[in-house]
Image (spheres, rainbow, N blue to C red):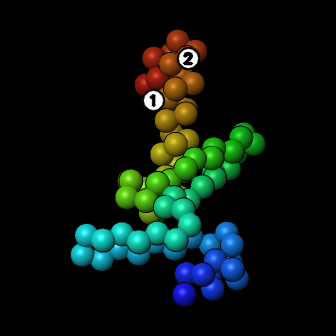
Amino acid sequence: QVRARLSASFPRLSILGRSKGIKLVSGNDFVIEAMDFPDGSTLTWKQVEGSFSNPNGHICKSTIEHICKISEGIVRGEGGEE
């Protein structure tokens, strides 16, 4: 009954509950996340419930930027070292 009212009022809302080994899902069990970068690109991904996610968005973004910088060095033949 509550699920039906929420779905009618908020059709894009997803709710997930977990207790004592039981998982109840209304809607999706994932979120779509996006992160913008200084070069104007946007990285978008599906974060599935139960998989690892860095809870600190700033650290996550810094890590990705660092990996991109090293990868660009490898592509240019510079070895990727800092």
Is residue 57 among the parts visible in the rendering?
no
Residue at image x 63%, y 85%? Answer: 5
Quadrant (top left, top right, bottom left, bottom right) of the N terminus: bottom right
Residue at image x 38%, y 53%? Answer: 52
Q: Nearer the viewer, residue 41 or 16?
A: 16
Please count the marks in the image: 2
Q: At label 2, which amino acid type do we have?
A: Val
Q: Residue furthest left?
A: 20
Q: Look at the numbered discs 2 and 1 and tell me whether their residues touch, using CB distance below 8 Å.
A: no
Q: What label does residue 16 carry, if any?
A: none
Residue 74, given in percent of the width and then of the height, sits at 50, 19
Q: At label 1, which amino acid type do we have?
A: Glu
- Corner quadrant of residue 14: bottom right
Looking at the image, residue 71 sits to the left or right of residue 17; the answer is right
Structural distance between the alpha carbons of marks 2 and 1: 14 Å
Which callout, 2 or 1, points to the residue nearer the camera? Answer: 2
Are there few (<14), some (14-19), or many (20+) residues within 10 Å of tag 1? few
Residue pointed to by mark 2: 75
Residue 53, given in percent of the width and then of the height, sits at 43, 56
Looking at the image, residue 52 sits to the left or right of residue 4; the answer is left
Quadrant (top left, top right, bottom left, bottom right) of the C terminus: top left
Residue at image x 25%, y 70%? Answer: 21
Q: Residue furthest top?
A: 77
> Compared with residue 41, is residue 51 higher up or lower down, i.e. above or below?
below
Residue 56, given in percent of the width and then of the height, sits at 47, 62
> Compared with residue 14, is residue 78 higher up or lower down, i.e. above or below?
above
> Compared with residue 41, is residue 22 higher up or lower down, i.e. above or below?
below
Q: Nearer the viewer, residue 75 or 21?
A: 21
Q: What label does residue 82 carry, if any?
A: 1
